[in-house]
Image: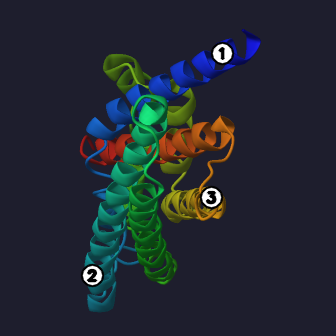
């Protein structure tokens, strides 16, 4: 009886994770978009260089590219969770699971590569001081309250944007990407032996992916309102 109760609780937990994941995914179609506008207009003196403007375009391109690959990977992750949820009713097709897992891993590697190039460009490009000033003066508490945003995650977003650490946002996301792909490889180690790891691995994977999605969405929303 205790074993059955444990399996039931595990199934409920996976179901909740899937619902949370799909809800966040639906509101995170744009990740960090607009952040490229913080770069490329020169130093605090207001001078502008053509190279800076080119870098600004490249930065926005890599934001979009990396976000696109991440969203494709997250879609595959949600499919994996769904397959775990249904395994007791339908059984587990480990070949199909491996196929979906491979797609998630491949897209995460592409997202990581895009963010590596993004960070290199961002570190080599001066900030746009006018945009930084707008970010510093933005009413974050009112925006959070009016839009009913998660206080913990939005508080992190505010900590980066208000004090002008835009490149820090990209670094945070990059290391979360690394975390996600490492968890996917942990799952892969079991799948190659036709077994799945403990449910906590899937829970932590989904929570990390959800955090990335929400953080990226909140960042983009601030930039669209300054």
The reply to whether residue 44 is in sight is no
Q: How many C-alpha atoms fall within 10 Å of the one at disc 1: few (<14), some, or many (≥20)? A: few
Asked which secondary structure carries label 3, the reply is helix
Residue 105: horizontal and vertical position, in percent?
Answer: 47, 67
Q: Which residue is mark 1?
A: 4
Q: Which residue is mark 2?
A: 53
Left or right, 174 with respect to 40, comes to: right
Q: Which residue is mark 3?
A: 179
The reply to whether residue 102 is in sight is yes
For the residues labelled 1 and 3, the Cα–Cα distance comes to 32 Å
Residue 182: horizontal and vertical position, in percent?
Answer: 63, 62
Q: Please state which of residues 212 and 83 is positioned toward the viewer in this rendering.
A: 83
Which quadrant is the N terminus positioned in? Answer: top right
Q: Residue at x 25, y 77 (%)?
A: 57
Question: Tag 1 or tag 2, which sits nearer the N-term?
Answer: 1
Q: Residue at x 46, y 62 (%)?
A: 98
* Extreme residue in the right direction: 2
Q: How many C-alpha atoms fall within 10 Å of the one at disc 2: few (<14), some, or many (≥20)? A: some
Residue 129: horizontal and vertical position, in percent?
Answer: 40, 63
Asked which secondary structure carries label 2, the reply is helix
For the residues labelled 2 and 1, the Cα–Cα distance comes to 61 Å
Q: Please state which of residues 191 and 47 is positioned toward the viewer in this rendering.
A: 191
Which quadrant is the C terminus positioned in? Answer: top left
């Amino acid at each position: 009886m205790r074993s059955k109760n444990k399996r039931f609780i595990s199934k409920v937990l996976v179901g909740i994770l899937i619902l949370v994941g799909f809800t966040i995914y639906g509101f995170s179609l744009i990740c960090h978009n607009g952040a490229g506008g913080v770069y490329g207009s020169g130093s605090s003196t207001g001078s502008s260089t053509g190279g800076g403007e080119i870098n600004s375009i490249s930065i926005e391109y890599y934001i979009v590219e990396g976000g696109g690959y991440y969203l494709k990977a997250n879609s595959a992750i949600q499919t994996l969770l769904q397959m775990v949820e249904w395994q007791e009713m339908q059984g587990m097709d480990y070949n199909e699971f491996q196929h979906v897992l491979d797609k998630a891993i491949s897209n995460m590697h592409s997202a990581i590569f895009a963010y590596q190039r993004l960070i290199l460009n961002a570190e080599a490009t001066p900030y746009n001081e006018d945009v930084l000033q707008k970010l510093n003066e933005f009413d974050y508490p009112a925006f959070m309250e009016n839009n009913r945003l998660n206080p913990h995650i939005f508080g992190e977003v505010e900590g980066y944007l208000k004090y002008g650490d835009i490149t820090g946002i990209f670094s945070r996301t990059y290391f979360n990407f690394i975390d996600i792909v490492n968890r996917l490889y942990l799952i892969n180690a079991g799948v190659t032996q036709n077994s799945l790891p403990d449910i906590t691995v899937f829970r932590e994977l989904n929570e990390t992916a959800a955090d990335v999605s929400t953080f990226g969405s909140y960042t983009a929303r601030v930039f669209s309102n300054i």
